[in-house]
Amino acid sequence: MTHWNVLERSLPWPPVVGGFLLLAVAPLVLFGFGVWGTFLPSGPILLSPVLIAGTLGTGLGIRYEWWELRRVIDQGTVVVSEAHQNLLAVVSGTLLTFAGVAELGVSPIVAASLVGIIAAITIQGVAVPVYCGAFVGMTSPELFGSYWYATLAAVLAGLLFTVAHPVFHGVGGKLGTTAFVGVLMILLPTAGSFQSGTIPSQRVLFPVVGFAALSAISSFTVHTRSAADPVLASGLVGTVGGLLLPVFVDASGELLAAAVYSASFAGMTDPKRIPNEWWIGTTGIGVGLVVVYTTPFVGGSGGKLGTIAFGSCLGIHGILRTLNIFHLSRRGYQPPKEETT
């Protein structure tokens, strides 16, 4: 049985496969909710085929990543290190963000963005797991109820961060999906307490999609064309959107801020996954649509926005590889080697 080192201990391949499956199922379920949302009374059924196509694209992306996982298992080339340090970083990011929301009244988007920015500037070596923890900490205090639940969700997300390390490198939204799974493991026993909203009016749809596309492009451009890393790029975009949109836009400002932050995770994608701003902008459009039509479902859960971005990125990446655009083929494609998303 192939093993990977985690500090001085060994990690067998079954947990890695389990981590892969947990990350793969989450966006499929959320996109399924998005399709469901288009059939609700206030949802336009004409958009159902678009979201169904996006869900199928996500499935394609997962299928291609399964090939990469099989190659990893066969070759046994992945080394996962610093697991304990990463776990501590996830928990720290969670508690800092949760405290900002629960004690200071800061919005979850702004709190998580600031934690990401500070981590990217001061402790670059663990900024990625800290940012993952920040998404856990975005969960509504009404759902967690106490710091103990937040900490437990962070530990679960931290463990998943380690076992899923070898897969989905460079796919935007992976950190949020990791957080989302950890949060749901705690909240599912009390699923009736999830927050729920109504599908926004159609006049809001185009602004949401437009802002999401612009956010994805901005985040992608910042981290691919400057010295900023993906965490810093996303944090900057999220802070601007989280501070300005709820103030200067009408009642839809919070929804716009959520779409902007979600799409900023898509912009964290490595260019080896999605090659340029045009395709990232398309990914952002998908993010905006799913944000709108999943409004009634699993509200208040940390990591939901990241999971939407993750599914959208997998969908576009899957379509690119299926069409063999930019020579992304089964044999010729090589995923990013370093985890940045």
Image (cartoon, rainbow, N blue to C red):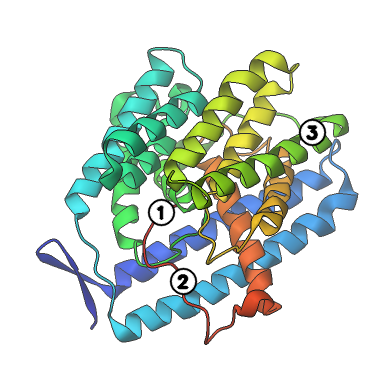
Which residue was labeled with disc 3? 207
Could you say which quadrant of the image residue 90 lies in? top left
Residue 315 drawn above or below residue 75: above
Residue 141 drawn above or below residue 88: above
- Front one among 125 and 154: 125
Q: What residue sits 65% from the left and 18% below the top?
A: 246
- Front one among 280 and 151: 280
Q: Residues within 10 Å of mark 3 (few under 14, many from 20)?
A: some
Q: What residue sits 68% from the left and 29% below the top?
A: 255
Q: Residue 340 shows which numbered tag? A: 1
Which residue was labeled with disc 2? 335
Q: Secondary structure at mark 1?
A: loop
Q: Amino acid at mark 2?
A: Pro
Q: Residues within 10 Å of mark 1 (few under 14, many from 20)?
A: many
Judge from the rendering whether residue 79 lies leftward or rightward of residue 198; answer left or right: left
Residue 187 drawn above or below residue 78: above
Q: Amino acid at mark 1?
A: Thr
Q: Position of residue 278 (x, y in %)?
A: 71, 56
Question: Residues at badges 1 and 2 in contact (C-beta under 8 Å)?
Answer: no
